[in-house]
Image: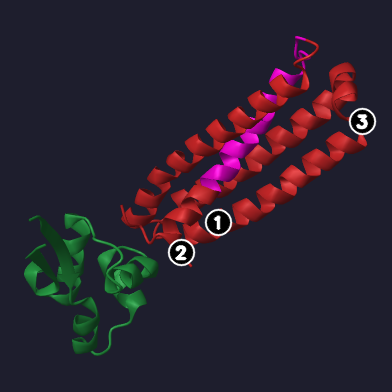
Chain colours: A red, B green
Amino acid sequence: MAPLQKRALYGLVIGVVWVIAIVVVFIVKGGVSTYSEDTGFRLIMAGLLIGGLLAYSIMMITTLRKSGQVDERDRLILGRAPVVQLWAVFISLAVWSIALTEIYWDQGQIPVIFPYLVFMSLFIVNVLAQSLGILIGYWRGGKP
Amino acid sequence: MTNAARIRNRIRRLRFDHDEMTQEELANRAGCTRQTIIALEQGKYVPSITLAFQIARAFGVTLEDVFQYEETSR
């Protein structure tokens, strides 16, 4: 397994655990209503999000900077990962939009806290989709 | 009728001819990862012209001794 592929796999596994942790904390602490009222809770969630993103970025940067770990094929695969990221973000946004519209159709308005949650979730999806895109690239063998 | 092009290589054969050079050794000499050599040998990846020259140089042969361009009519 190529070093970048290994990192992408670890990134995906750790990322899924990170997402589960965020969702569990979110639900245990009281969900959307608490999130919109409690500033401390919002800070905890922001901390989890930023901490996870930093850990992922450091992991990817250290892999890319180590000489001999990444070659032209790896860079080609890495360069194609944004296609998967784009689709993942697009699909997530579509799911959020349809779900929120259908749920809050009768009220005629969506609670103001949701755009914030949508933004956070899309950030997470974007990061996870990069790892997924890299793994798909290796699975396809670097073919165009 | 369309023309389909394919790049074939003799890397596995050349490694055998060079005292069973390992994939790792070739990768180190050519400046790529072992996984790329594996992908090349399996015909799953076509290298850049730079890497192709580096592989040929690692074997001490010309580019066309390693890579062959084939065009077939379909």
**Residue designated by label 2:** A2
- Looking at the picture, tell me which residue is in the foreground, A94 or B41: A94
Q: What's the residue at 16%, 63% (across, down)?
A: B6
Q: In screen coordinates, is A74 left or right of B74?
A: right
Q: What range is drawn magenta here? A: A108-131
Same subunit, tags 3 and 2: yes
Q: What's the residue at 33%, 77% (across, down)?
A: B23
Q: Secondary structure at mark 3?
A: loop
**Residue designated by label 3:** A30
Mark 3 or 2: in front is: 3
**Residue designated by label 1:** A7
Q: Residues within 10 Å of mark 3 (few under 14, many from 20)?
A: few
Classify the position of the C terminus of chain B by image quarter.
bottom left
Q: In screen coordinates, is A77 left or right of A111?
A: left
Extreme residue in the top direction: A108
- Quarter of the view holding residue A101: top right
Check the image and report above or below for A50 versus A16: above
Q: Which amino acid, mark 3?
A: Gly
Task: Identify the disc placed on residue A80.
Answer: none
Task: Indicate the position of residue B8 as horizontal and vertical percent values.
Answer: 17, 70
Q: Quick one: label 3 or label 2, which is nearer the N terminus? A: 2
Task: Give yes or no for residue A125 being in the magenta stretch.
Answer: yes
Check the image and report above or below for A85 versus B29: above
